[in-house]
Structure formats: C-alpha cells, structure tokens
C-alpha cells in the first residue's frame, strides 16, 4: 500500500513511518522544509513538498504523490482540515485515516475543542472513506512533551504537590497509537468509524505519578493540594510568561476523569496496548533515567 502521511516529521509521525516500513508499506510524507524532508527521509519515507498553510501547494503534493490512502497525523486544531479534505478529494484519494484527540470530549470551553470538532464534522461529512482515531495523552520518548518533562523532575524533586490526584488518566504509548493507525489504514472495513485509543485501563493521577517515580527510582514524596489555588497561580504565570510550560487549561482538565472505552479498537483493530508501567519504564530507559 502507498500512503501519504501528513505530520510525518512530528513525534507520532516517527512511530507511524517506522511501523509502516516494518509492514512493507511505501510512504510519501508531506514536508514544508528541508529539515522536515531530511527527517522523513531518515525514517524511510519519500518527501513531497507541501505546506498545510498553502492550499495550492497542498493540492499539488496530494495529486503528485499518487497514493492509495491518506494518513493525517497533523493536528486538527489549527484549522487545516478544509484544505486537507479538499486536496484529498481532488487528488482521488478515497481512503483516509485522521488522528484527532479525546480532548474533544472535555466539558471545558476550550477554543481548540471547537476547532477540532469542526474539523471532525467536516471529515465525517466528506466523500472520503474516513476513519477517525482519538488517542488520549500520548507518551513514549523524549519527544512526547508530556511525561518526558515529568521524569527528570521526579529524579530531583524531594517533594511534589499533587493537585487533582484522584481523577482518572489513561495515557497511551505512541507505539500503540501508531499500530492502531496503520491497522485502520489497512482495513477499509473501519471506514465511517471513530475509535478511542487509550491505555489498557485508567489509573488515578496519583498512581500515574507513583508509577513514573518507580521507573526512575525516585523517592519523591507526593503531597495532595487543592486545585483552585494552583490554577490561580498558573493563571498569573501565563500572563507573566511568554511561553508557559504549563497552562491553566491543562490544570483544569486534572479535575476531569479521562477514562475511555477501547473495546471497539480491540475488536476492529486488534488493539492491544501496553500497560502504563511497562511504557513509562521504556521511556525512562530511552531518556537514560531508568532505575
């Protein structure tokens, strides 16, 4: 199968391109810069120049790639869905797999939620034979921007305040998401379906922290704290910091249970995600922080 991949030079893209190569698929990856082109080439993909912000270049890239299926890993949170869907339809690419996020289920009035839901509605109303995958928080190696920040902190912090520690999380390893993406692309029978893609079972935020601490042999003491004052402090931090490392929306979501049923993915995609304990130990080893 010949696949056109958007977002191939990103964190999840690396896993998908390696998995595609291991399954014997040919991949063409959209690249808007020489750096991105070099990155996807190193992962076994053929780069094709195109920019999601430039619909004309996107249409040309989709047409010249002559691919059987589109695998869209690029975020749906930036308003690019209309150009992507239009380019795929005009290029005659009927089959398409889109990666969204379970964050669209939040009850918070997040701007990104509205943009992503609009994108999903556009996709599901299109003429494409689409499949939507919604992963939870993705982790796996130093590029994940989530737990890769936590592990070094646990190595050096003797005490860590824990807001919202009793609410549920269900993070998913990038390798498991990649496997689900490729299986969905290979199975036309998944067309018209939306799948939640998460870890095997939910765990409390406090248990997540304990498992991560165990992976790096941390003796950090976790101290429960009320969420409200932490949010207030984060709000001031956002105002004073140009590029905040944590945002109010992230903290407010700690007050929501993020637990998802994965039975449909197990049935239709042979989905078998690794445990969080195994996945976080592997990430710790990849970062040179393992116990």
Image (spheres, helix red, strand yellow):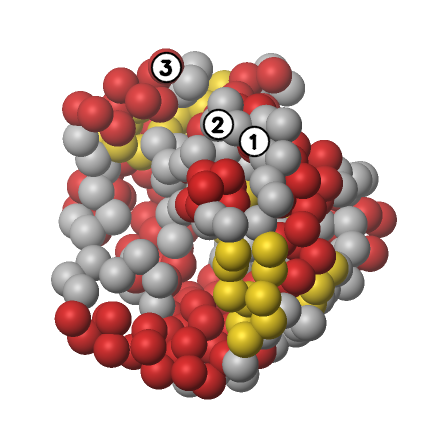
Secondary structure at badge 2 equals loop
Q: Nearer the viewer, mark 2 or mark 3?
A: 2
Q: Quadrant of residue 41?
A: top left
Q: Residue at x 51, y 59 (%)?
A: 160
Residue 228 vertical position relative to residue 268 in the rendered view, above or below: below
Q: In this view of the protein, which residue sits in the foreground, 145 or 111?
A: 145
If you read the primary sequence from the N terminus, does the residue marked by circle 2 or circle 3 appear first?
3
Residue under label 2: 287
> Measured from the top left, where is residue 181 in percent x and y?
60, 40
Circle 3 residues within 10 Å: few <14, some 14–19, many ≥20: some
> Measured from the top left, where is residue 123 in percent x and y?
48, 62
Q: Nearer the viewer, mark 1 or mark 3?
A: 1
The C terminus lies in which quarter of the figure? Answer: top right
Q: Left or right? Give the position of 220 relative to 269.
A: left
Secondary structure at badge 3 equals helix
Q: Tell me the tag on residue 284.
A: 1
Secondary structure at badge 1 equals helix
> Measured from the top left, where is residue 8 in percent x and y?
39, 33
Residue under label 3: 42
Q: Left or right? Give the position of 72 relative to 101.
A: left
Q: Residue at x 84, y 49 (%)?
A: 267
**Distance from label 2 to label 1 (Cα)?**
5 Å
Q: Quadrant of residue 105?
A: bottom right
Q: In this view of the protein, which residue sits in the foreground, 63 or 153?
A: 153
Residue 54 vertical position relative to residue 225 in the rendered view, above or below: above
Q: Left or right? Give the position of 239 relative to 18.
A: left
**Distance from label 2 to label 3 (Cα)?**
21 Å
Do the numbered discs 1 and 3 sit on residues whose CB atoms are within 8 Å?
no
Do the numbered discs 2 and 1 sit on residues whose CB atoms are within 8 Å?
yes
If you read the primary sequence from the N terminus, does the residue marked by circle 1 or circle 3 appear first?
3
């Amino acid at each position: 199968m010949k696949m056109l991949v958007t977002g191939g030079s990103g964190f999840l893209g690396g896993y998908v391109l390696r998995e595609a190569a291991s399954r014997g698929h040919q991949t063409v990856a959209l690249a808007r810069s020489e750096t991105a082109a070099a990155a996807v080439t190193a992962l076994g993909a053929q780069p094709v120049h195109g920019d999601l912000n430039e619909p004309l270049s996107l249409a040309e890239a989709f047409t010249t790639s002559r691919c059987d299926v589109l695998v869209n890993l690029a975020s749906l949170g930036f308003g690019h869905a209309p150009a992507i869907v239009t380019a795929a339809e005009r290029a005659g690419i009927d089959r398409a797999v889109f990666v969204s996020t379970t964050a669209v289920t939040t009850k918070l009035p997040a701007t990104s939620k509205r943009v992503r839901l609009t994108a999903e509605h556009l996709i599901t109303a299109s003429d494409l034979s689409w499949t939507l995958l919604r992963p939870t928080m993705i982790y796996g190696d130093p590029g994940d921007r989530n737990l890769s920040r936590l592990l070094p902190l646990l190595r050096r912090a003797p005490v860590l305040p824990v807001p919202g520690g009793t609410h549920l999380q269900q993070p998913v390893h990038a390798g498991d998401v990649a496997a689900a993406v490729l299986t969905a692309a290979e199975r036309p029978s998944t067309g018209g379906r939306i799948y939640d893609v998460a870890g095997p079972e939910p765990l409390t935020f406090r248990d997540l922290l304990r498992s991560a601490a165990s992976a790096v042999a941390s003796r950090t003491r976790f101290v429960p704290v009320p969420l409200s004052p932490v949010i207030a402090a984060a709000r001031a931090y956002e105002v004073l910091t140009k590029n905040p490392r944590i945002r109010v929306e992230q903290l407010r979501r700690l007050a929501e249970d993020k637990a998802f049923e994965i039975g449909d993915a197990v049935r239709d995609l042979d989905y078998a995600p690794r445990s969080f304990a195994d996945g976080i130990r592997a990430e710790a080893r990849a970062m040179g922080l393992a116990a």
